[in-house]
Image (cartoon, helix red, strand yellow):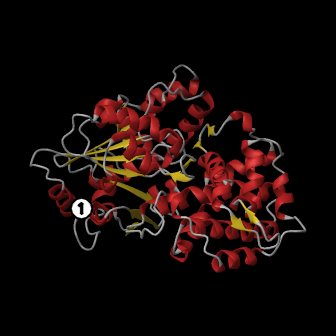
Amino acid sequence: MGGAEDAPRAAAANGHGNGATVEEKLDELRRLLGKADGDPLRIVGVGAGAWGSVFCALMQDAYGHLRDKVQVRIWRRPGRAVDRATAEHLFEVINAREDVLRRLIRRCAYLKYVEGRLGDRTLYADEILRDGFCLNMIDTPLCPLKVVTNLQEAVWDADIVINGLPSTDTREVFGEIGRYWKERITAPIILSLAKGIEASLDPLPRIITPTQMISNATGVPLENILYLGGPNIASEIYNKEYANARICGADKWRKPLAKFLRQPHFIVWDNSDLITHEVMGGLKNVYAIGAGMVAALTNESATSKSVYFALCTSEMIYITHLLEEEPEKLAGPLLADTYVTLLKGRNAWYGQKLAKGELTLEMGDSIKGKGTIQGVSAVDAFYELLSQDSLSVMHPEANRSVAPVEMCPILKALYKILIKRELPPDSILQAIRDETMYDPRERIEMAQGHSLYRPSLLGQPKGDAKA
């Protein structure tokens, strides 16, 4: 594949974006940001998981040949060693791709991979990322990237920061970044790719999303922080499988950025509803873990998986009615994102491995070759929020007030399996086979027939309309 030193995949994009050339799109964004001639637009990725690395590689491929006008860098922590088995597999990947092999030889970088395979040298994650190999996605070589391991050096003068961190790391890392930005005169633009949430119970139960964490940690106004998400798999996007995504946030930046990010194979739409789309990105990860468990426990039974899908989507629809005044608008994006995650996402994969006994909960939720399994912390957060009595709803059969989580048996089962560790993974089957369970359609009808909306869950005063 083309790299930082080639103009390649890049300029193939010469006509995308509503007829504008790559350079015209870059010039337009530079003008909006007030960049002077000779001062490159600085795009910095923070976090080098699969999606974060692919996103920066897409920017490098599209715009990196315009060196005088743009600079793309990515930060990752130093010191992460590549184990011997991964080094051996990486060597196989390199030799199976003639273009990658030639590129490494041309860059005088091939020998270290030979030594790594033989065990004569320890390779490091930041080192191989410079050559285009993401530790969480070894089988998909990227273009070479400019990697920085010093966080302050990476971000202090950045114009656009891409948050590729897991939601569980976002607050800590951006808290550190906030200290480096205290003297900044102008706020950068931050584009978050993170799908996950935290729960805050005091003074009222509410959800905290990664963009809110970033704003609180850095002081950057929320109008400068956007979220990008959609039904896609990072490796497939880099391999030019047709995909779409949605950038959400304030009017000021989302339309210009949507245009800047759009490519022939990667269509970016825009929407003003930032927080709700972020939350939905976290919600589907919850149920993806359960889907993986069901698939493994039933030997990929199509019937069992469809039963689970009907039940989990009814729970998700119920939860969206609590979070959103007009939840119907979210049905398409949420189901599409859920569908691709069930097919090929890491959360479903994690559920499968747990059910098969190939992984254990004691191993934690950061898995070699996959990164952080965001659904685990999301299960905890959604359960804690929806178990609060202050959010009580009317139970249709018991005719009494209950916490919303009582209407979500799968969420309850996942909490007992993953967080409390009271039940084994195969108990998820009991949750979907309960003879006393009512038709999932009834849960949907109940959600539609009652005023469930709780604006406080997304930090909005009652009665406030969304932008």
The residue at the far left in this view is 37
Nearest the viewer among 284 and 273 is 273
Q: Is residue 20 above or below residue 144?
A: below
Q: Residue furthest right?
A: 435
User: Viewer-proximal residue, 285 or 179?
Assistant: 179
Relative placement, left or right, of 81 versus 248 is: right
x and y, in percent, of residue 438 in the image: 82, 73
The image quadrant where one finds the C terminus is bottom left
Q: Secondary structure at mark 1?
A: helix
Q: How many marks?
A: 1
- Residue that badge 1 annotates: 22
Residue 261 point in image, percent of width and height: 33, 60
Q: Is residue 351 above or below residue 177?
A: below
Q: Is residue 419 left or right of residue 280?
A: right
The residue located at (24%, 61%) in the rendering is: 22
Question: Residue 251, image x and y in percent?
Answer: 29, 65
Mark yes or no: residue 298 visible: no
